[in-house]
Image (cartoon, grey):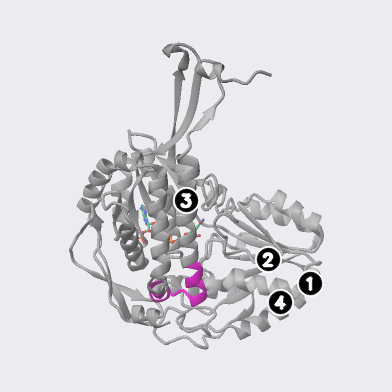
Amino acid sequence: ARAMQAALEREWTAVPVIGGEHIDGATTPSIDPTDIRRVVGTVVPATESDVDRALEVSTQAQPDWDRTPPAERAEILERAAALFEERGAELMALAVREAGKSIPDAVSELREAVDFLRYYAAGAREQFGNPQRLPGPTGESNTLSLHGRGVFLCISPWNFPLAIFTGQIAAALAAGNSVLAKPAEQTSLIAAHAVRLMHEAGVPGDVLNFLPGRGSLIGPRATADPRIAGVAFTGSTDTAWRINRSLAARDAQIASLIAETGGQNAMIVDSSALPEQVVLDVVASAFRSAGQRCSALRVLFLQRDIAPRVLELLAGYMDELIVGDPALMSTDIGPVIDMKSREALEAHAEAIAARGKLIYRCRLNGAPGHGSFFAPMAVEIDALDWLEGEVFGPVLHVIRYRARDLDNVIESINATGFGLTLGVQSRIDSGARAIGRKANVGNVYVNRNMIGAVVGVQPFGGCGLSGTGPKAGGPHYLHRFATERTLTINTAAVGGNATLLSLAPD
Ligand code: NAP
């Protein structure tokens, strides 16, 4: 707690780091969403020439990094994981101050980042360190090996400013790529600290380059460049489309694009579900992290028969939630990321409450007066098509359905085109599994909340408009960062096939 307090009082900085060199320039402040008068630190935004320089050094550095034995790359990532743990208080303090994360969320954020580092380190050893022997005729050996593709651009959002930022970079590095890392503007300081620790752990400065600043400047400049071999992006679907178009317009190597984007996540609750459990899981899924998780619950489909009881319990629970300073252990829900986001949410809240029926709106009972706080709300609506897209905050939309309309409910969810997470609450196992099978989504959660995927346990990612796959924290992720090579040798050419001699007789 003392280390966190000291970190909270420190002035942090984020500057472009290119080839290990720290670049000076005009600064902009990074603001605390809990109190927008408070400056957490300063950021020097990268310029277009910084992007060009980073491309130059990372292109030169990549082949050596790729030739570094995968086990050595893994050791460096594991050292970074240990450093993240050692300096965890600082990273958590930054997650609280810069991103408005509550303390439990900051702990999860740190844990996920560390898990990504260790998981991809293990992947580098297992998948990149052991070329696979393939079958072939006698007199021939065949092996398949994985290598880095080149320079990867990693672009992350502010809602998991440490975990996703680190996860993308760790995967790209593990696979033998060099990296240009671009954090979200709102959360450059925590990203800068993560990069500091990764460099301290031994990632070479020219292999990991850091470019804080405007996405609309850095993104187009880098993605138009023929030297970019791949992009790992997490953020909105609109930005993913922009990146995809920019990469496609190049007459250059066809880049790999790993995009993890938004969702229109639903939970289906049938009449056999346990109302008390439903309410606990709904509140965690819809409101934890102020609803600013890509996996967060947006639309709750409640079977009519149990709706009155569930909604009564829901309103009661919402009345108990404390919305306030995320640095306090008593706080359940912190601020949304900035005033712009709060204004957009308030506009939606007003419009949807006027059209639908307000179930409950939390009080801003612990919120400091100068923060970007938004009171979580639950509102009943008639149909899913009332929503035009993802509402990225603590607004829960509730729709009642009749048991006989269940298939239509699933179809309407599929028709949104998104496919990220789905919750199901039912005590009829076969029914829950059937819903899971019919829904086109990447992650289905039955009788539990639908957030907080654990690395290596619930590999995470969506389909359709929600992402390109494969899943972060899953066994196939590193492959998308890799290129494959085969090596075929005619072993008979050096005087026969020696392996035949050592074959045991039957
Ligand atoms: P966003 O506006 O798309 O921003 C994400 C990142 O893209 C930021 O670093 C941003 O930089 C950068 N960017 C902006 N314009 C760009 C361009 N033209 N080219 C390249 N990069 C550009 O998304 P957001 O609103 O911050 O993040 C929330 C979204 O992320 C939600 O839709 C959420 O569902 C999604 N998300 C998905 C997952 C998942 O795993 N599926 C996880 C977390 C979040 P600036 O900050 O400088 O604008």
Real-space Cα separation, disc 4 to disc 2, in angstroms: 18 Å
Amino acid, disc 2: Arg
Magenta span covers which residues?
93-109
Q: Which label was assigned to residue 311?
A: 4
Of badges 1 and 3, the one in the foreground is 3
Give the labeled residue for mark 3: 120
Q: Secondary structure at mark 1?
A: helix
Give the labeled residue for mark 2: 448
The answer to whether the residues at label 1 and label 2 have Cβ atoms under 8 Å apart is no
Quarter occupied by residue 255: top left
Q: Quadrant of ligand 1?
A: bottom left
Q: Is residue 496 above or below residue 462?
A: above
Identify the residue at horizontal 64%, vertical 66% (top origin): 449
Q: Is residue 491 above or below residue 385?
A: above
Whether residue 95 appears in magenta in the rendering, the answer is: yes
Real-space Cα separation, disc 3 to disc 4, in angstroms: 42 Å
Q: Quadrant of the N terminus?
A: bottom left
Give percent across and percent down for residue 324: 49, 83
Of badges 3 and 2, the one in the foreground is 3
Q: Secondary structure at mark 3?
A: helix
Q: Is residue 257 left or right of residue 314?
A: left
Q: Secondary structure at mark 4?
A: helix
Of badges 3 and 4, the one in the foreground is 3
Q: In front: 332, or 269?
A: 332
Q: In front: 397, or 219?
A: 219
- Disc 4 residue lies near ligand 1 with CB under 8 A: no
Give percent across and percent down for residue 129: 45, 40
